[in-house]
Image (cartoon, helix red, strand yellow):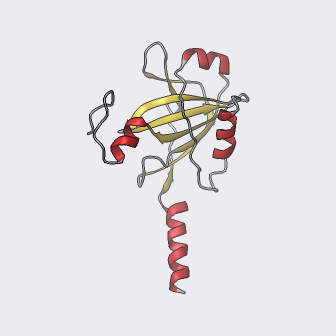
Amino acid sequence: MVSLLTGFAIYYLQVYAYYEDVIANGETDVELVSLASGEPEPILYDGFEAIDATSSPIRYRACFKTEQSIALITETYETYEGAEPLVAPRWFDCFDAVEIGEAIDDGTAFAFLGQRNIEYGIDRVVAIMPDGRGFAWHQINECGKVVFDGLPVPEGCPPKP
């Protein structure tokens, strides 16, 4: 009985306990890095929902809708190579990492840089589908992969805080 309760407690803590709804500000919740300035800029969006947890920098997930065309977005904002959406809790059902990943892989969705090093070694990645559905998540970047493994900061990466 103790092992059953322990198992349930671990499951609950991983799937429900640490997540909180992100309060949208309605203006800068969805940003992409501009090719011209190299800085994050807000895009038009609505229907924003997001969750995050203080227990890990990669638990952030968001869903939204945009009316901006993929053509305009790809000409204006920096794409993101190696985007791999992370699975969200089942109860956050607007975010389907498998669907998003397959769409990126087959070229029907495009991934963009939302913000580099939103926290050291972690990038915010934004993917947009042809129908205007958009998704965002945090992903460990190349600098983070090396430093989090305990290796020295590679050349070209910001100094470790």
Question: Image quadrant of residue 43?
Answer: top right
User: Percent x, y for residue 48?
Assistant: 60, 38
The answer to whether residue 62 is left or right of residue 38 is right
Residue occupying the point 41% across, 55% down? 55
Residue occupying the point 33% across, 31% down? 157
The correct choice, above or below, for 5 with respect to 51 in the image is below
Q: Nearer the viewer, residue 10 or 50?
A: 10
State whether residue 147 appears in this view.
yes
The correct choice, above or below, for 18 with respect to 120 in the image is below
Q: Nearer the viewer, residue 144 or 15?
A: 144
User: Percent x, y for residue 30?
Assistant: 53, 31
The answer to whether residue 155 is left or right of residue 54 is left
State whether residue 95 appears in this view.
no
The correct choice, above or below, for 66 with respect to 10 in the image is above
User: Percent x, y for residue 80?
Assistant: 53, 28
Q: Residue lying furthest top in this view?
A: 36
The answer to whether residue 125 is left or right of residue 70 is left
| The N terminus sits in image quarter | bottom right
Q: Nearer the viewer, residue 71 or 93?
A: 71
Residue occupying the point 63% across, 16% down? 72
Q: How many marks?
A: 0
| The C terminus sits in image quarter | top left
Q: Residue lying furthest right in this view?
A: 131
User: Percent x, y for residue 54?
Assistant: 41, 52
The answer to whether residue 161 is left or right of residue 124 is left
Residue occupying the point 39% across, 34% down? 117
The correct choice, above or below, for 36 with respect to 5 in the image is above
Question: Image quadrant of residue 111?
Answer: top right
